[in-house]
Image: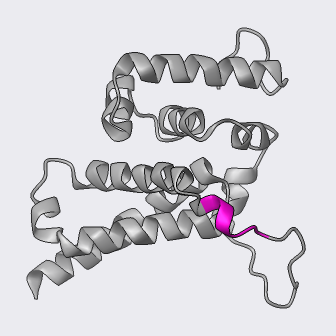
Amino acid sequence: MATDLEFAEFFTATWPRLYRTALAIVGDAAAAEDAVQSAFARVYASWRRISSADHPEAYVRRMVVNEILSGRRHGWGRRERPSESVDPLTSVDSPEHRVVTHGSLWPAIRQLPVRQRAVIVLRYYEDLSEREIAAVLGCSPGTVKSQASAALANLRRHGALQDGADA
């Protein structure tokens, strides 16, 4: 079926980028994969409609971010706690995780409230404009600006950024 092939191509092309974005926002590989997987399950069910959108990837990115944000509201991140100790025989080192955790800034970003973290990741990691971030988060550009300002102030306060420096 042509639509299944189109979906498979879209999935293959966008999964890695959407996963990295989700991982940067949520800070946990399993939770990021769950969010992206849940979003893609809904995308598949509505593929004909979504594929005809002006920017399907932007639409799906918004679904992924909303999945993360709504999951936090509903306790999704509180049900399971990842363990700090993992059996080395069963663990697999993910290259995506190394990209996200590289440097001292990412641990500080993971300490931000989830909406501030989402704004920082979408702005500086995904290079989206304030207007695009507002569309993803379903808020006004002014809210994006205030969330970004608060996030940068938090990062400066915790020493992750030098005074006057942006992420």
Quadrant position of residue 39: bottom left
Residue 103 in the image, given as x and y percentages of width and height: 79, 43
Q: Quadrant of residue 155?
A: top right
78 is within the stretch colored magenta: yes
Q: Is residue 22 left or right of residue 50?
A: right
Which quadrant of the figure has residue 159?
top right
Left or right: 138 with respect to 160? Answer: left
Question: Where in the figure is residue 165, as x and y percent of width and height?
Answer: 70, 15
In the current view of this chain or complex, which residue is farthest to the front?
A: 74
Q: Which residues are magenta?
A: 77-82
- In x, y percent, where is residue 92? 74, 80
**Extreme-top residue of the structure:** 164
Q: Is residue 27 left or right of residue 40?
A: right
Does 26 sit above or below residue 2?
above
Number of disc labels = 0
| Quadrant assignment for the C terminus | top right
Q: Up-down: is 98 above or below 142?
A: below
Q: Is residue 64 above or below residue 130?
A: below
Give the residue at x 72% y 59%: 98
Quick check: is 83 in the magenta stretch? no
Could you say which is closer to the camera, residue 1 or residue 49?
49
Assign the N terminus to one quadrant of the image. Answer: bottom left
Q: Could you say where residue 147 lies in the image, as x and y percent from the top left?
A: 53, 23
Q: How is the image coloured?
A: one colour
- Residue at the spot x=53%, y=39% of the render? 118
